[in-house]
Image (cartoon, rainbow, N blue to C red):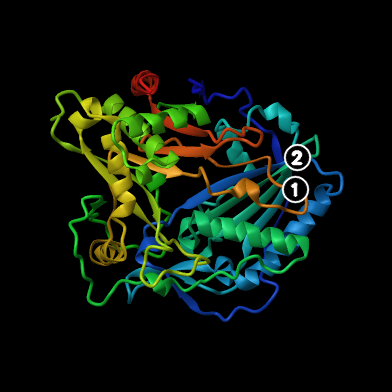
Amino acid sequence: MGAISQECNPNVHDLRVSIHRSSTVYPSGPSDGRSMFLSNIDQVLNFDVDTIHFFAANPDFPPEAVGERLEEAVGRLLVTYDFLAGRLKYNLEEERLEIECNGAGVGFSVGSSELELEEIGDLVFPNPAFRQLVAEKSDKLGMEDRPLINFQVTFFKCGGFAIGISNNHTTMDGIGAKMFFENLASLAHGRPLSFIPCNNRRLLAARSPPQVAFSHPELLKLDLPPLTLDAQPSTILNGGVKDIDFKLFRLSGDDIAGLKLKAKAQGSSGPSITGFNVVAAHIWRCKVLATMAPGCNPNDESRVLYAVDLRSRLRPPLPQSHNGNAVLTGYGSAKYCELEEGPFATLVEAVREGAMRMTDEYARSVIDWGQLYKGFPRGDVMISSWWRLGFAEVDYPWGRPIYSCPVMIPNSEIIVLFPDKKGMSDNGVNVCVALPTKDMENFERLFYKYLGEV
């Protein structure tokens, strides 16, 4: 087996970053001052997503040139993405969030580290110190004053650098973010936009009246007080479990191929046997069994959750350039006894059913459910996959990132899939797990036990 695990405990805990200048970048053209409707999917994603994009030194682009070129490209891009220069507000009459496209601008800062890039260590392993590469957020700013996106360029002594981007998730999903980065890179090159984004969020509006046609066991009704203008972004992804360990498990291409063969030998159908489906099934089984409470009813149902792109699933399909959050939570379900004793193929099929279930009718029912209950997905395992978003494939004037990754927040509810670092060509995947120490020991034991049965 090619799988390895490594504690996410880097030697470098302080990147010694100093910020040299901070500014606000405004759209280089006028904004029409409209209010942008946010779908029910957007509504529950009011939290920030922080990503880091690392670049090797490029002699043609010294620090000043990168900062200036990027800042200029951001200003131009905000003409098309004018909502990013706006601010969230709460519409009291409609009782929902929207974006006021007021041209208030985005944050942009430039800094430097006293370290060389190679001193940080392996970029694949989540390092809490990476948070220093993303612009600091001011807790004193209310929702209506907080920029929806912030950029920070940090240069290392070797000439390499990192671009940290923090954006509110209401603005776009992962696919939309990839298009945004492609457009940013294109403008930095001096070229036209690579994609013309579709910013019409009403394509995912609820029906009137709402028509909930399914039971939706993957969703939880929340009894929340009315949102106020001073509300802080959702803390759903901030966890709440203290004293948890990070560990990264790497599945090589051979490991994944072995899982596929195992599923096939046990009767999984051809369309089910994808890399994601077998990896998700393996993680689901290990996480649930590692954390299952003593005395749990073996006939109780477990659910694994993951994002499903809606763009091609709706009727009519959404434009592929749809820029909002066009994803919903797919789920697979199985009894606890099936996770422990059942064939692996059963779990792979259950994962596949989550995506197959996401038809136009089902997706519209979820959106309408959100109109009535304003709830949130629930399950035993939530998998956030950055595996094939392709952020490291974006070609900037100074080159492609040597690695792109989210800044990890300790959360025992979510397992994150990362792509391999450039140079690892066997199509493997990195699995980042955060669990209390005892549960982590159980997870690791089960991870290799079931992998060894391939």
Instruction: Say whether residue 213 is left or right of residue 227.
Output: left
Secondary structure beneath label 2: loop
Res. 263 image quadrant: top left
Is residue 24 at all visible to an observer of this figure?
yes
Give the class, few, some or many, for how many residues have Cα within 10 Å of label 1's Cα (few <14, many ≥20). Answer: some
Q: Are marks 1 and 2 in contact (CB under 8 Å)?
A: yes
Residue at 36% in and 29% down = 262
Q: Position of residue 332 (x, y in %)?
A: 28, 44
Distance Cα–Cα, label 1 vs label 2: 8 Å
Where residue 450 sits, quadrant-wise, is top left
Up the image or down, 407 lies above or below 81; here it is above
Residue 441: percent from the left, percent from the top?
A: 37, 18
- Toward the bottom, the furthest residue is 32
Q: Position of residue 32 (x, y in %)?
A: 57, 81
Residue found 42% across the figure and 63% down from its top? 312
In the displayed structure, 262 sits above or below 418; it is above
Q: Residues within 10 Å of mark 2 (few under 14, many from 20)?
A: some
Q: Disc 1 designates what residue?
A: 399
**Percent position of residue 270, x then y:** 36, 43
Residue assigned mark 2: 56
- In the image, is 295 to the left or to the right of 179? left
In front of the other: label 1 or label 2? 1
The circle on residue 419 is none
